[in-house]
Image: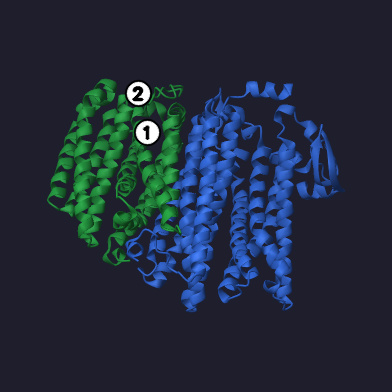
């Protein structure tokens, strides 16, 4: 493995982590948005506060990790992507800003009316962010970002791959969040909430599955390099992802929520990995390879030192946070 | 205005809105970044006092401050993310060629932010869930990460002022040394200036809140302690800051003489140079200033008879916007000196047995000191950033070459104005309502949409 590929792998590990953890936080917005009136949704919205409250900021930092590693290791491709995909990047950013701010504001708002306003902003922006990140991924994967960054500001991402990518991202995040929230609701003893969440998680999962199938033909025509990779080198991962997704549906249907969390994570992680391996060796598909886009070797080495530090300092702390939030004492008010 | 239109025609379409948007988002974020850096340390002091002395007042303060930090750190995190995106969205001409030169310190800053976010989550939700002493310790990684993160970010800004760690051969960047960027010789002093500034800002702002409460007659121990702890931090910081700032300023004569000339409103080289207080450049001539002989040389060069280079020794194309730089610089120095004087007055009076917390005029000033500290910090950033113009990276990359040529940037800037206004109002409304409910005796602030509230 060459130095640039090693750093690209570390970068992509961040993409997978953000997709899983950040994605699940975003997905909670879908359930919050569809929880109904303030009286009916009270229990669920409190569960959302409780489940993502302690972790969303830490999970959000994976995005910073990805951005920083990208511009440090592959600077020209970062500049090219932000120039061409200016609009979806900006809209994803809008979603991120509104989500984080409104989530914090809602928890401490003084009146129900204010909480409703902030809650609506929080929940809606939770869907905006993954949608536009999905379009960015779709544009990169379908070769819409030229090396010099002067791709069309609109046509580059208003494509089948980008738009399906956006919808699939929203669906995947929601499905992941549904599985996690259902498990949390069961553990904290909310049987009514469990059954309503379970029903809606199944619906979201099935719908997302249908969209993925519907997208297969348009994407394979629109993004040939990617689809060659997905049906070639990355095929085992895609098969595993499909099986894990189906297994998650079965487990949720049979009320086995704890193992369902594992299969859901496997399903999402493998599809993200499949995308990365599918578009290898390109960093910007059909435009710039990982080798060609890499910055100075000394910087790549320094970045690997930073990644090593992250493994030593950040991962244990992150594990501690997750262990605490999953412990019994943490669950009651 | 033929000159202005000529300049605009040559500039990329995104230059002006990119500068405006960067100034807005950086100017907004920096206030919250200060809270991220300094507030955990202040919370640690009251929280520790609460535990060690079994002091319910101090513990109550720590609880409330941690809830306030939940709101401030959330909008700080997202407004910091805006800056990460904007590096690419607004400045592709910087990030494309120089991303691998300046990126490494940002990677380490990312790690610090990771640590801070993780322990923030643990600390905020750890109340009544973790053993008290273990809970208190969660603040230490946060405070440490704030220091490391500040150093890393500031090292990049110092690198923009004093670029190092690379060579340009035939227009290509080569011989990149990321460690030389991280440990560049300008970083430590600039970091000290920002770090101390963060404690000034947070100290004076938090103290102002409790000073306002005392002015309204709430003179209980809660308000006294809530005032004294942040004011204590602000006192130390505002006495250190003139020293740090002075040492930092002396360097400018060598590193960025045109910035120094703008700071000093020096149109021609003078030896010794006077200190000009106030004043503006009108048609190339300084007007309306108060002149103190020789002190310009002392402040800029550390000696009463060294020369200060004038703006006329630089071609027009390499001069910064003089008036904005000069006014911002002197406002920073003026406000900083006023705040330093005020803390001296407070502690001298205290030493002589007078408690100025009982003095209404002093409390009124303390309320004003919060916004003043914010103004000083903003002015400092305006002075250093505008003073570096026309360069983004000193004598390496012009801002015109760094900016995007995206013609739609005015839309994004307008959107940013709306979003930041909305977030400011949102934060204000929520923080005010938290304070109101606390005064009404509601300590835990349950969410208004929770099940308990719905049934009540």
- Image spot of residue A330 (x, y percent): 31, 64
SS at mark 1? Answer: helix
Q: Which is more toward the observer, B234 or A260? A: A260
Chain at numbered mark 2: A
Q: Where is residue B206, by image quadrant?
A: bottom right
Q: Nearer the viewer, mark 2 or mark 1?
A: 2
The spot of residue A42 in percent (x, y) is: 32, 57
Is there a contact, CB below 8 Å, between mark 2 and mark 1? no
Determine the secondary structure under disc 2. Answer: loop
Q: Nearer the viewer, residue A328 or B395?
A: A328
| Residue at 60%, 67% in the rendered image | B210
Q: CA distance from mark 2 to mark 1?
A: 20 Å
Q: Residues within 10 Å of mark 2 (few under 14, many from 20)?
A: many
Q: Give the colour chain B carries in the figure.
A: blue
Q: Which residue in the protein does label 1 denote?
A: A4
Badge 1: residue crowd in 10 Å (few <14, some 14–19, many ≥20): many
């Amino acid at each position: 493995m060459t130095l640039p590929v090693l750093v690209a792998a570390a970068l992509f590990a961040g993409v997978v982590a953000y997709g899983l953890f950040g994605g699940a936080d975003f997905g909670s917005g879908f359930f919050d948005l569809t929880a109904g009136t303030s009286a009916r949704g009270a229990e669920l919205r409190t569960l959302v506060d409780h489940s993502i409250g302690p972790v969303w900021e830490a999970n959000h930092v994976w995005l910073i990790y990805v951005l920083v590693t990208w511009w440090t290791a592959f600077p020209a491709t970062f500049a090219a992507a932000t120039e061409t995909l200016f609009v979806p990047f900006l809209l994803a950013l809008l979603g991120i800003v509104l989500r984080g701010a409104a989530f914090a504001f809602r928890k401490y708002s003084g009146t129900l009316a204010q909480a409703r306003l902030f809650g609506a902003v929080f929940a809606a922006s939770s869907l905006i962010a993954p949608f536009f990140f999905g379009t960015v991924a779709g544009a990169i994967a379908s070769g819409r970002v030229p090396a010099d960054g002067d791709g069309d500001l609109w046509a580059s991402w208003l494509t089948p791959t980008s738009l399906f990518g956006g919808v699939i991202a929203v669906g995947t995040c929601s499905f992941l969040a549904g599985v996690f929230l259902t498990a949390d609701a069961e553990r904290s003893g909310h049987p009514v909430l469990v059954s309503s969440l379970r029903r809606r998680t199944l619906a979201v999962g099935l719908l997302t599955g249908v969209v993925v199938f519907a997208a297969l033909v348009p994407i394979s025509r629109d993004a040939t390099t990617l689809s060659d990779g997905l049906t070639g080198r990355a095929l085992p991962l895609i098969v595993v992802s499909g099986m894990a997704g189906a297994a998650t549906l079965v487990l949720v249907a049979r009320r086995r929520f704890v193992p369902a969390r594992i299969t859901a994570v496997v399903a999402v992680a493998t599809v993200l990995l499949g995308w990365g391996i599918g578009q290898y060796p390109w960093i910007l598909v059909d435009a710039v390879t990982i080798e060609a886009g890499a910055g100075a070797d000394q910087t790549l080495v320094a970045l690997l030192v930073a990644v090593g530090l992250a493994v030593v300092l950040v991962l244990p702390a992150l594990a501690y946070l997750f262990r605490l939030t999953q412990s019994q004492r943490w669950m009651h008010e | 205005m033929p000159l202005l239109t000529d300049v605009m025609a040559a500039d990329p379409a995104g230059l002006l809105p990119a500068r405006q948007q960067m100034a807005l988002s950086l100017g907004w974020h920096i206030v919250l970044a200060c809270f991220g850096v300094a507030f955990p340390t202040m919370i640690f002091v009251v929280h520790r006092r609460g535990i060690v002395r079994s002091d319910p007042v101090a513990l109550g303060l720590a609880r409330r401050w941690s809830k306030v930090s939940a709101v401030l750190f959330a909008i700080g995190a997202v407004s910091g993310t805006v800056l990460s995106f904007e590096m690419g969205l607004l400045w592709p001409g910087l990030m494309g060629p120089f991303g691998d030169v300046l990126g490494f310190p940002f990677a380490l800053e990312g790690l610090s932010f990771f640590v801070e976010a993780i322990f923030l989550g643990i600390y905020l939700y750890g109340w009544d869930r973790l053993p008290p002493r273990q809970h208190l310790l969660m603040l230490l990684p946060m405070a440490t990460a704030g220091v490391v993160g500040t150093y890393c970010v500031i090292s990049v800004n110092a690198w923009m002022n004093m670029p190092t760690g690379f060579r340009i051969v035939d227009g290509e960047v080569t011989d990149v040394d990321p460690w030389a960027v991280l440990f560049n010789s300008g970083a430590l002093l600039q970091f000290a200036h920002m770090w101390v500034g963060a404690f000034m800002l947070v100290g004076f702002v938090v103290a102002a809140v409790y000073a306002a409460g005392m002015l309204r007659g709430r003179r209980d121990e809660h308000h006294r302690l809530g005032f004294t702890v942040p004011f204590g931090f602000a006192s130390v910081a505002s006495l250190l800051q003139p020293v740090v700032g002075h040492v930092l300023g002396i360097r400018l004569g060598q590193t960025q003489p045109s910035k120094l000339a703008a700071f000093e409103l020096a149109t021609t080289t003078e030896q010794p140079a006077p200190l000009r207080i106030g004043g503006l450049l009108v048609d190339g001539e300084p007007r309306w200033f108060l002149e103190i002989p020789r002190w310009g040389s002392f402040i800029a060069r550390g000696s009463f008879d060294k020369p200060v280079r004038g703006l006329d020794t630089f071609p027009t194309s390499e001069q910064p916007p003089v008036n904005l730089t000069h006014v911002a610089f002197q406002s920073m120095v003026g406000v900083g000196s006023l705040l330093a004087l005020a803390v001296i007055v407070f502690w001298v009076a205290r030493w002589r047995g007078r408690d100025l917390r009982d003095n209404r005029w002093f409390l009124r000033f303390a309320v004003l000191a919060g916004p003043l500290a914010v103004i000083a910090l903003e002015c400092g950033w305006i002075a250093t950033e505008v003073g570096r113009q026309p360069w983004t990276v000193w004598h390496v990359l012009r801002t015109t070459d760094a900016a995007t040529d995206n013609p739609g940037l005015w839309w994004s800037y307008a959107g940013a104005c709306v979003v930041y206004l909305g977030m400011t109002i949102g934060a204000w409304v929520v923080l005010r309502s938290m304070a109101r409910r606390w005064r009404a005796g509601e300590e835990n602030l349950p969410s208004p949409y929770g099940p308990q509230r719905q049934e009540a």
